[in-house]
Amino acid sequence: MLALMLLSQPVQAFEVMVKDSGAAMRWPSFPVAWSVNAQNNAGLDPNMAAVVAQRAAEAWEVDGTAVKLSYLGTTNARTSGHDGQAAVYFVDQEWPWDESLLAMTSSYSDSSGAFLGFDIAVNTRDHDWALDGNSELMDLQNTLTHEWGHVLGLGHSEHDELATMHASASPGEVHKRDLSQDDINGLFQIYAAEVDIPMAGCTAIPKSPKGMVWLGVLASILLINRRRASS
């Protein structure tokens, strides 16, 4: 009887980001303001890249949650740091993280787990990008929608390959543009009213005495597979 009941329960793939103390990481209030520096050397039209970044954010503004991501326009910011300015930007040179990573989200929180700020860096140094789902290039909206999930406090959905929060992507992939049911479940777990937040998931990495940083990443399947083939 117990086994049958367990099997009948829905499988939860999403992960909620938590600190070492077990405190869930989340935005204490909305809207969350952000900007974009869409200047790049990757051949992406800056105006369209900014529109794509907005579409990716809007995918997470789901009815029934309090999530509101308020776009302020363009900025000259191009570095990650808890500087009071949340930005999406492109890195054409001196990518400081592993080259297989498509993008990196740096999120900053206080000791209670309340987010203080974030930045999203897109790796235009090591990857080729498109805005239209080109089958041979990485899709920007696909990647940015994933990164916005990290901004809101979701880790990776390791057991659901169709989830926006699955940890890897391939050229031409566009299904992460739209949230799966698992992504929506995770969002409601954090931001719907009268819902308990599970004490499990990704841990925070110390950044400074004033806050904490959590780094969210999306890796390219193509580059990982190339590495494995050559090893």
Image (tube, rainbow, N blue to C red):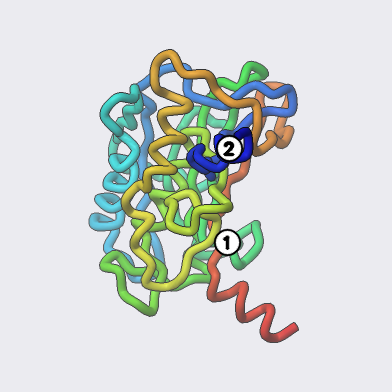
| Position of the C terminus by quadrant | bottom right
Question: Is residue 39 in sight in this rendering?
Answer: no
Tell me the quarter of the picture where residue 110 sits. top right
Tell me the quarter of the picture where residue 86 sits. top left
Q: Residues within 10 Å of mark 2 (few under 14, many from 20)?
A: few
Q: Is residue 16 above or below residue 115?
A: below
* First along the sequence among labels 1 and 2: 2
SS label for mark 1: strand
Query: Residue 6 — which label?
Result: 2
Q: Is residue 201 above or below residue 129?
A: above
Q: Residue at x 34, y 56 (%)?
A: 141
Question: Is residue 180 in sight in this rendering?
Answer: yes
Indicate the amino acid at tag 1: Leu
Q: Residue at x 59, y 31 (%)?
A: 108
In the image, residue 160 lies at what x, y percent? 50, 53
Of residue 95 and residue 212, the one placed in the foreground of this image is 212
Indicate the amino acid at tag 2: Leu
Q: Residue at x 35, y 27 (%)?
A: 67
In the image, residue 144 lies at what x, y percent? 40, 51
Residue extending furthest toward the front: 1
Query: Residue 101 — which label?
Result: 1
In the image, residue 16 lies at what x, y percent? 56, 34
Residue extending furthest toward the top: 194
Query: Residue 3 — which label?
Result: none
